[in-house]
Amino acid sequence: ITIPSDLQSHLDSQEREILIQALRETGFNRTAAAARLGLSLRQMRYRIARLNIETPPSSEISDEPV
C-alpha cells in the first residue's frame, strides 16, 4: 500500500468517487443515493457541495425515493 502524501485529499477523492457511483446507480436521485450510503439527504447535499460534484439540473432529477 502506498501512503498518500496528502491524506485529506486522498480521502476526498475516494469519497467523491463513491458518491458519484451511488448517484449514477440511482439516476442521480439524491435521496436514494443517500439511503444507499447510510446518509441523510442533508448530509448527501453537504458532501455533494463540499466535493464540488456536478449533478444534472434539478429540473431533470428529483429527491423523491425510487
Image (cartoon, helix red, strand yellow):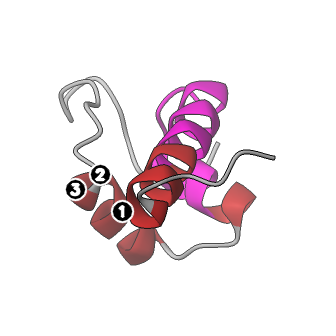
Of badges 2 and 3, nearer the viewer stands: 2
Residue to which mark 2 is pinned: 51
Q: What is the CA distance from the residue labelled 1 to the residue labelled 3?
A: 5 Å
Residue 64 seen by the camera = no
| Mark 3: few/some/many CA within 10 Å (<14, 14-19, 20+) | few
Disc 3 residue type?
Ala
Query: Which segment is the magenta one?
Result: 16-34
Residue drawn at 28 percent across, 23 percent down: 60
SS of the residue at dot 2?
loop
Contact between labelled residues 3 and 1, with CB atoms less than 8 Å apart: yes
Occupied quadrant, residue 56: top left
Q: Position of residue 14 (x, y in %)?
A: 57, 47
SS of the residue at dot 1?
helix
| Mark 2: few/some/many CA within 10 Å (<14, 14-19, 20+) | few
Residue to which mark 3 is pinned: 49
Frontmost residue, 25 versus 8: 8
Disc 2 residue type?
Leu
Would residue 19 appear left or right of 38 to someone viewing this image? left
Residue to which mark 1 is pinned: 47
Frontmost residue, 52 versus 45: 52
Would residue 16 appear left or right of 21 to someone viewing this image? left
Frontmost residue, 6 versus 12: 6
